[in-house]
Amino acid sequence: MRVIIIEDEKTAAAKLAQMLLSIDSSIKIESVLEGVEETIDYLRSNTHPQLAFVDIQLADDVSFEIFKAIDVQFPVIFTTAYDDYIIKALELNSIDYLLKPIAEDRLKLALDKVKKLETHFIQHKFNALFDQGKPSKSRFLVKKGIEYVSVSTNQIAYFFTEHKIVFLKDRNGEKYIIDKNISELQELLDQQFFRINRKYIAHIEAIKSFKPDNGKLQLTLEPTTKEEVVVSKENAPHFRQWIEEQ
């Protein structure tokens, strides 16, 4: 399990890390962060963890400010000396709330909860994909000139919008009009496609390369595009994780 610790007291962070590894030696502590701004910068530039331990009162602000700046999709366990913030913590991705000083048996219960939820999520996702889920489309009906043609999904490079019209471009560079918006298409496609931004959805095989650009990612697609295709700072970690998992 990939974990980050957000804690401005170095002694507390070190003790928490030691207890985590004592409970489960397979845990990988990827970073220990001390403040709100440092954490926001980290999450914008790195693959998000599978779990975060977050102190509430940090040196530069309360950690809730992190959640205002970043779309946090990973589970969070709050660690604090105060019980005043429980209601606020429950509104976020919190799955537990540990009061300091943290007892090792209480920490173990929190980790067990994470693992149970993770197992449930994986099973639910498996069922949704293979038993209950709506299958992704294998073909799309598109228009070229006055003719309608059917394009196989495995021949699609990307979808994009231009002058409020949505187009499909295949791997040979042919361009077609499609009568669906980007959000509708996103619901119909499998995990080989990624919503790059509000204008583009691309197949993984169409992504020739990408490079960092002040926290964002600048993509080169094949066939080439007339404009720059950019992944936002907030979405960049999700994009990197998606690339690695394909």
Image (cartoon, helix red, strand yellow):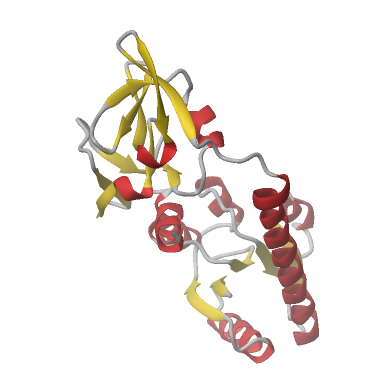
Q: Is residue 75 above or below residue 22?
A: above
Q: Considering depth in this image, is 199 or 11 the residue closer to the camera?
A: 199
Could you say which quadrant of the image residue 37 lies in?
bottom left
Q: Residue, x 76% and y 73% (percent of image)?
A: 110
Q: Residue, x 53% and y 28% (percent of image)?
A: 184
- Residue 124 appears at what percent x and percent y? 72, 55
Q: Considering depth in this image, is 173 or 202 the residue closer to the camera?
A: 173
- Residue 23 appears at what percent x and percent y? 69, 88
The reply, left or right, for residue 130 in relation to residue 169 is right
Could you say which quadrant of the image residue 136 lies in?
top right
The reply, left or right, for residue 193 in relation to residue 168 is right
- Residue 238 appears at what percent x and percent y? 46, 54
> Which corner quadrant holds the C terminus?
bottom left
> Which corner quadrant holds the N terminus?
bottom right
Q: Considering depth in this image, is 140 or 215 the residue closer to the camera?
A: 140
Report whether residue 81 is seen.
no
- Residue 54 appears at what percent x and percent y? 62, 66
Report whether residue 73 is seen.
yes
Considering every residue shown, the one lying at the far bottom of the view is 22
